[in-house]
Amino acid sequence: MYICICNALTDGDIHHAATVNGARRPLEVFEACRCRVQCGTCVRKLLALVKQSVAGVEIAAEAAENMPVPAQGAA
């Protein structure tokens, strides 16, 4: 889904900027996507998606840490 019409940024672009590039603020997202703020209408939705993406990564990392490790030689 398009989030920023001015720059043709999708929710996938924003998720990638947040999870891969570490963007946490709108300016960081725009820089990671190699564009700049235009009208600013998308900023609230963009921030919500960044928070959602970061929270998802943190939950996945925590789940991975808590996974049991199989015993050596177990079939």
Image (spheres, rainbow, N blue to C red):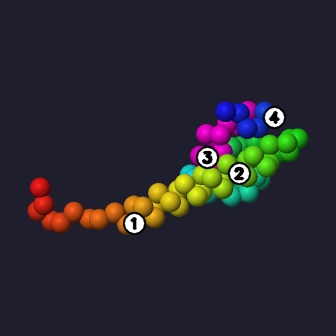
**Three-letter amino acid code at the position of disc 4:** Cys
Q: CA distance from mark 4 to mark 1?
A: 40 Å
With 65 as the anchor, is 39 left or right in this view?
right
Question: Which residue position holds label 4?
Answer: 6
Q: Any mark on residue 65, and which? A: 1
> SS of the residue at dot 4?
loop
Residue drawn at point x = 29 percent, y = 65 percent:
68
Q: Relative to 69, does residue 50 appear above or below in the rendering?
A: above
Q: Quadrant of residue 5?
A: top right
Q: CA distance from mark 1 to mark 3?
A: 22 Å
Q: Which residues are magenta?
A: 6-18
3 or 2: tag closer to the N-terminus: 3
Q: CA distance from mark 1 to mark 2?
A: 26 Å
With 63 as the anchor, is 35 left or right in this view?
right
> SS of the residue at dot 3?
helix
**Three-letter amino acid code at the position of disc 2:** Ala
Question: Which residue position holds label 2?
Answer: 48
Q: 5 or 35: which is nearer to us?
A: 5
Task: Specify few, some or many for label 4: CA neighbours under 10 Å numbering under 14, 14-19, or 20 or more.
Answer: some
